[in-house]
Amino acid sequence: MKTVQEIVMQQTFSRDDLVVLLNTEGEERTQLFSVAAARKEDVVGRKVFFRGLIEFSNICSKDCLYCGIRKSNDKVVRYDATDEEILEACRFAWQNRFGSVVLQSGELSSPVFVERVDGLLKAIKKLSNGELGITLSCGEQSRETYRRWFESGAHRYLLRIESSTPELYAKIHPNNDHHSFEKRLNCLSLLKECGYQVGTGVMIGLPFQTLENLADDLLFLKKIDVDMVGMGPYIEHEETPLYEHRYLLKSKQERFDLALKMVAALRLLLPDINIAAATALQAIDPAGREKALKIGANVIMPNLTPCSYRKEYQLYEDKPCLDEDADLCKNCLEARIELAGSEIGYGEWGDSRHFFSRGNRPK
Ligand code: 5AD
Ligand code: FES
């Protein structure tokens, strides 16, 4: 059998190799982390890029079995930030030289919603003289909608596949047309076709999930040739159906450790992509995101959602930064990133190198 030392030096990885990496502990895990950290520095450098995250609405038409803002959770107070509040958060990001913002919401596809996002994109470009990069994370949409939003200024899109194993996907979503694995997969190709830098990701430590499933997730990310990945630990939420399976879960610490190993293995597998340090890591370990930045991640998404709404965007329990305001969060992040030994790419878009290596030009 191959040793971890041999595997981390490879350029390509089999499913079995990846399972070995995900199983590492002690010395071997340290070795995986240090090789991944070195690979990151060689290929994408030491810089960490900021994306100011604006969770502008928690109104959602979907009922994912793991998500705290699912449509059927009637304990959530639904909100829709005003355009002015959203633009104010963007102005803050621009003035503080964040480089980019991410507009995230529950999933809606009504003409009113599509039109509204379109108007916001144009307004954000205008207020920042075209300088703020914009990532959207607004779920599954039609080709026309994706195209329209791209033309209005969005250049990256995040749509997590959640699990690339169709059987597992089916266990964590309602079994109907509105929650179809195939449709979600198709959306990822539509996004690429429209010219976006495409980001996806999975949850780690789900009930019923095996290390083989996670190895397949990594291979899936390679197969679809992603530009960006955000992936973090699954964290149970009491007001969701998946909560009943909490007895099947690994401990939170184990899920956290596994998420870090996934990040490190991904950096080895796809060295030139952007990898976000997921907020969910911080829900388990206060220094969780910084730990991910040390061993392979290079993007962080400070929360710029207006404070009064934050407690209603609880996708999972213990979501951090519920009562910070944007200013405080930024200070806190700077100090933390220094601790992690990285520099910050102020005012830079920090686009995925991979996107350009697959033949695209800067927007
Ligand atoms: N635990 C961890 N991550 C979650 N997400 C949603 N619910 C949870 C949860 N309970 C993640 C999903 C989604 C992203 C916005 O948040 O991966 O795509
Ligand atoms: Fe808000 Fe740290 S980023 S508390």
Image (cartoon, rainbow, N blue to C red):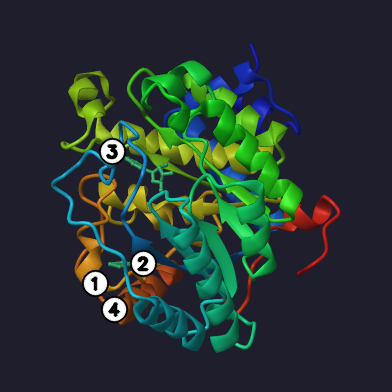
Local SS, label 4: helix
Label 4 and label 3: CA atoms lie apart by 25 Å
The residue under label 1 is 307
Label 4 and label 1: CA atoms lie apart by 11 Å
Frontmost residue, 219 versus 334: 219
Residue at x-position 68% and y-position 57%: 147
Label 1 and label 3: CA atoms lie apart by 22 Å
Residue 342 visible in image: no
| Label pair 4/2, CB-CB below 8 angstroms | no
The image quadrant where one finds ligand 1 is top left
Q: Residue furthest top?
A: 1
The residue under label 4 is 328
Q: Amino acid at mark 4?
A: Leu
Q: Amino acid at mark 1?
A: Cys
Residue at x-position 46% and y-position 53%: 110
Q: Which comes before the other along the chain, label 4 or label 3?
A: 3
Question: How many residues crowd mark 4 within 10 Å: few (<14), some (14–19), many (20+)?
Answer: few
Q: Is mark 2 within 8 Å of ligand 2?
A: yes
Frontmost residue, 121 versus 12: 121
Q: Is mark 3 within 8 Å of ligand 1?
A: yes
Does residue 81 lie above or below 31 as drawn? below
**Residue 73 in which image quadrant:** top left
Q: Which comes before the other along the chain, label 4 or label 1?
A: 1
| Label pair 3/2, CB-CB below 8 angstroms | no
Residue 181, given in percent of the width and then of the height, sits at 53, 27
Residue 245 is marked as none
Comparing labels 4 and 1, the label whose residue is closer to the camera: 1
Quadrant into which the C terminus falls: bottom right
| Label pair 2/1, CB-CB below 8 angstroms | no
The residue under label 2 is 303
Question: How many residues crowd mark 3 within 10 Å: few (<14), some (14–19), many (20+)?
Answer: many
Q: Is mark 4 within 8 Å of ligand 2?
A: yes
